[in-house]
Amino acid sequence: MMTGPVRLWRSAAIIVASLVLTATAGFAQLTSGDVTGVVQDPSGAAVPNATIVATDIATGVKTTLTSNASGEYHFANLHIGTYDLTASASGFAPSTVRGLGVELNKIVTANITLQIGQTTSTVEVTEAAAAIDTSTAQITGNFNSRDAEELPSTSTGSGVINMSLLQGGVATSGATGAGTGPSIGGTRPFYNNFTIEGIDTNNRGVTGPVVTVPNDAVGEFTLISNQFAPEFGHSSGGQFNTVVKGGTNEFHGMAYEYFQNRNLNAADNLNYVQDNPLHPRYDNNRFGGNVGGPIMKNKLFFFVDYEYNPIGNSASGGAVFAPTAAGWNTLAGMSGINQTSLNQLKKYLGTAGTAADPATTPFGAYPLVGPGNSSLGLQ
């Protein structure tokens, strides 16, 4: 289905492509979620050696394991999505939990009760319980692809990172300290950590993501703000994790455009004071589209997002600063001046015809000259 949301945005164009392979591929929990629980009979006794099958509804990929002697099972590193969970054992009717959500960086607990009966009949729990992580103490906020597309906060500034402000213990940094993103638990943005598909994308100069993913290509975004596992590590602030959408057994896609222009922007009072146009040209269009689908049903999938971001601005006015001929001679006579570099500067900067009254410029001995050929005259 093709759709075309229109929103505001400021990011650079980026191309994202993702291939989702078979369920046997290995994923770290940085890009996946876990499901754990206990298989038991109606009396609450454990059912050992029960077979549990987790089926990804979108891709049809199945993952199978067996409960231990205590009836416990643990699916590690499942791809994020919605699953049907079916348990079966000898002497019991199979039981299916439908619509179990597996979220990024979370461990979901789903206990299954098997009823004594014929294996030809199936007991279905048509609605899964809310996906709550009761196995760890980490504080996690999860935002899915629909949140990334529709929440207004993602359309400006830092994009999907802005969604983290909806989580408790998160506040804007107030321009305090270097780095990107909000303050997590009172720490400065300098201590935040950013990953995409489990890959470190931190800027080594000033903390922040080197690469960003377009909103409409985000599969899920997670902020872990406290008590995170050692595998996340790296930083003591927030853990900002993003995964890209993937293909499914059904072809799907969308076209979109985000834009901002002079007709949408309010007039700037400074433009009025400085006798500039109230609505100077500013056309920021970020448009693109994505498509995903199967290459081999239930086994191999593709997803591609393409985005282009042209920006048009009105030419900036103001004075052109350059030394006069006497000023260039003064510079050439200074010791330590590289003459080759000075000649190149003179070639592109030009020479001021006359020098203005020093009283008309804040540069003191380096006054501005008249309009039209405004220049900095070095005397």
Image: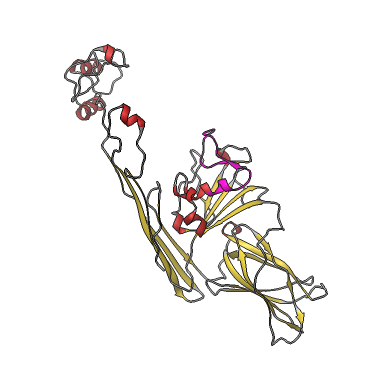
Q: Quadrant of the N terminus?
A: bottom left
Judge whether 151 appears above or below 69 on screen. Answer: above
Q: Which residues are magenta?
A: 163-183
Q: Quadrant of the C terminus?
A: top left
Percent coordinates x, y for residue 277 in the rendering: 27, 34
Compared across the picture, whether 57 is left or right of 123 comes to left
- Return the residue nearer the eye: 163 or 298: 163
Q: Which picture quadrant has residue 132?
A: bottom right
Percent coordinates x, y for residue 107 in the rendering: 66, 60
At x 48%, y 76%, the residue is 297
Q: Which picture quadrant has residue 333?
A: top left
* Residue 354 appearing in the image: yes
Compared across the picture, whether 161 is left or right of 256 comes to right
At x 31%, y 49%, the residue is 310
| Magenta span main SS | loop
Percent coordinates x, y for residue 135 in the rendering: 72, 58
At x 35%, y 45%, the residue is 264
* Residue 57 belongs to the span the image colors magenta: no
Compared across the picture, whether 261 is left or right of 84 comes to left
- Return the residue nearer the eye: 69 or 173: 173
Percent coordinates x, y for residue 222 in the rendering: 57, 53
* Residue 308 appearing in the image: no
Judge whether 184 appears above or below 373 on screen. Answer: below
Q: As drawn, which residue projects farthest toward the left?
A: 353
* Residue 170 belongs to the span the image colors magenta: yes
Q: How many marks?
A: 0
